[in-house]
Image (tube, rainbow, N blue to C red):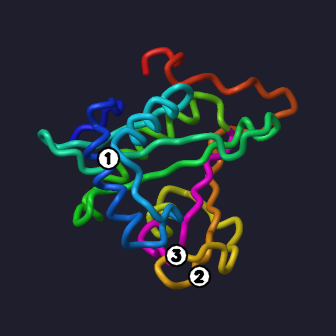
């Protein structure tokens, strides 16, 4: 397996991976799968500041992970939110871990203090995965989203990346990191 930066030509495979979750699970609260063009836009928008990685074996993309700002207001700029998805049937094969081995250190180097994982639930596999990576449950909000005929909870998990200080430097764009 190899982890690399996502590119626009990856959009069809990423859209297919994500569509499975949008259509069959409450993990994402999107109800319509994004188009390939929308995925291309999301890759470009994300990479303007954050890493967006794919994990592949041979010519097959098995999963992807990226981050974005948790909130848009300036005071939240040191907090990011992560997302990780693996191809249906590829869970528990080390794909998510390979992606987080690249993503989390990059976010730390960018200067973020916390990474948040916001999970639509039930999502036991993702909860176990995030706890293994050191994320801790911060809050559980019952019945926040209605999807697939029922109400679903949202759980917030947090991972400390860098210490909080009184004189924080602004996070730097991923593309500006030396030797990415």
Q: Is residue 62 above or below residue 178?
A: below
**Rendering coords of residue 76 (x, y %):** 77, 41
The magenta region covers: 113-126
Label pair 2/1, CB-CB below 8 angstroms: no
Q: Residue furthest bottom?
A: 150
User: Which of pointers 2 and 1 lies earlier in the amino acid sequence?
Assistant: 1
**Rendering coords of residue 77 (x, y %):** 73, 35
Q: Identify residue for label 1.
A: 14
Element marked by disc 2: strand
Q: Which quarter shows the N terminus?
A: top left
Q: Identify residue for label 2.
A: 151
What residue is shown at x 57% (from left), y 56% (from top)? 117
What residue is shown at x 75% (from left), y 24% (from top)? 169
Q: Which quarter shows the C terminus?
A: top left
Element marked by disc 3: strand
Quarter assignment of residue 93: bottom left
User: Which of pointers 1 and 3 lies earlier in the amino acid sequence?
Assistant: 1
Disc 1 from disc 3: Cα separation? 22 Å
**Rendering coords of residue 55 (x, y %):** 28, 43
Q: Residues within 10 Å of mark 3 (few under 14, many from 20)?
A: some
Question: Tag on residue 147?
Answer: 3
Label pair 1/3, CB-CB below 8 angstroms: no
Let me know if residue 105 is in the magenta part. Answer: no
Is 103 left or right of 75, judged from the image as shown?
left
Label pair 3/2, CB-CB below 8 angstroms: no
Q: Residue furthest left?
A: 58
């Amino acid at each position: 397996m190899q982890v690399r930066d996502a590119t626009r030509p990856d959009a069809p495979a990423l859209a297919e991976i994500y569509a499975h979750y949008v259509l069959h699970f409450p993990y994402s609260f999107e109800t319509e799968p994004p188009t390939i063009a929308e995925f291309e836009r999301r890759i470009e928008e994300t990479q303007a500041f954050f890493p967006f990685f794919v994990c592949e074996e041979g010519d097959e993309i098995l999963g992807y992970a990226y981050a974005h700002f948790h909130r848009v207001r300036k005071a939240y700029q040191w907090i990011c939110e992560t997302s990780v998805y693996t191809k249906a049937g590829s869970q528990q094969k080390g794909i998510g871990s390979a992606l987080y081995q690249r993503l989390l250190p990059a976010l730390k180097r960018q200067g973020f203090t916390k990474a948040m994982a916001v999970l639509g639930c039930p999502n036991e596999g993702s909860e176990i995965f995030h706890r293994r990576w050191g994320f801790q449950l911060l809050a559980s909000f019952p019945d926040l989203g209605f999807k697939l005929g029922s109400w679903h909870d949202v759980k917030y998990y947090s991972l400390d990346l860098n210490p909080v200080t009184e004189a924080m430097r602004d996070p730097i764009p991923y593309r500006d990191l030396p030797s990415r």
